[in-house]
Image (spheres, helix red, strand yellow):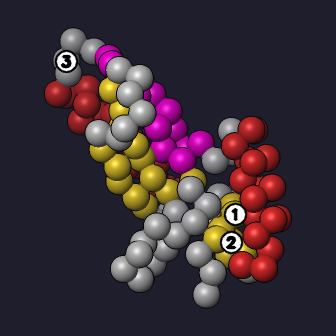
Amino acid sequence: MTDLYILDDNNQPVPVPEEDLMDWGRWLDTAKASGRRLVGEDTVGDFRIWTVFSGCDNNWDGGTPLLFETRVSEGGEKRDLYLRRYETWPQAEQGHRSVCQQIRGACPEA
């Protein structure tokens, strides 16, 4: 089983055989340059919230692949204050909205 994925035209993950590593890498580069991997990106006060398709399974315990992730950083720092992963694009969209709402609720001045 592969840990590598790309997205089809409907944002559904498609497994990529490990022997096609170079094709997968080119797809990721092209998708990043075009914004295709970006599910959402917002700034709330000093917080940056972004959600992306990672292209690889980050579920190291087995089970359904976790291919999308939301990250939060503050004040331009490189380290993440928050990280959450999802199985599907719709879950990632909902998760992104939820994190943005939580931060707006905790930072009403933002």
C-alpha gap between disc 3 and disc 2: 40 Å
* Magenta-highlighted residues: 38-52
| Residue 94, above or below 106 | below
Q: What residue appears at the point 69 percent right and 63 percent down from the top-left corner?
A: 6
Decide if residue 60 is in sight here. Answer: yes
Q: Which residue is mark 1?
A: 6
Residue 14 image label = 2
**In the visual, does 102 lie left or right of 90?**
left
Magenta stretch contains residue 40? yes
Which kind of residue does numbered mark 3 sit on?
Answer: Pro
Q: Which residue is mark 3?
A: 108
Measuring from the top left, give residue 89's x and y in whole percent: 53, 56
Q: Main secondary structure of the magenta part?
A: strand
Query: Which is nearer the eye, 78 or 46?
Result: 78
| Residue 70, above or below 3 | above
**Cβ–Cβ under 8 Å for marks 3 and 2:** no
Q: What residue appears at the point 57 percent right and 54 percent down from the top-left corner?
A: 53
Decide if residue 9 is in sight here. Answer: no
Query: Which is nearer the eye, 79 or 37?
Result: 79
Measuring from the top left, give residue 73's x and y in whole percent: 36, 32
C-alpha gap between disc 1 and disc 2: 5 Å
Of labels 1 and 2, earlier in sequence is 1
Q: Say which quarter of the image contains residue 54.
A: bottom right
Magenta stretch contains residue 36? no
**Cβ–Cβ under 8 Å for marks 1 and 2:** yes
Residue 46 image label = none
Of labels 3 and 2, earlier in sequence is 2
| Residue 19, above or below 104 | below
Which kind of residue does numbered mark 2 sit on?
Answer: Val
Circle 1 residues within 10 Å: few <14, some 14–19, many ≥20: many
Which kind of residue does numbered mark 1 sit on?
Answer: Ile
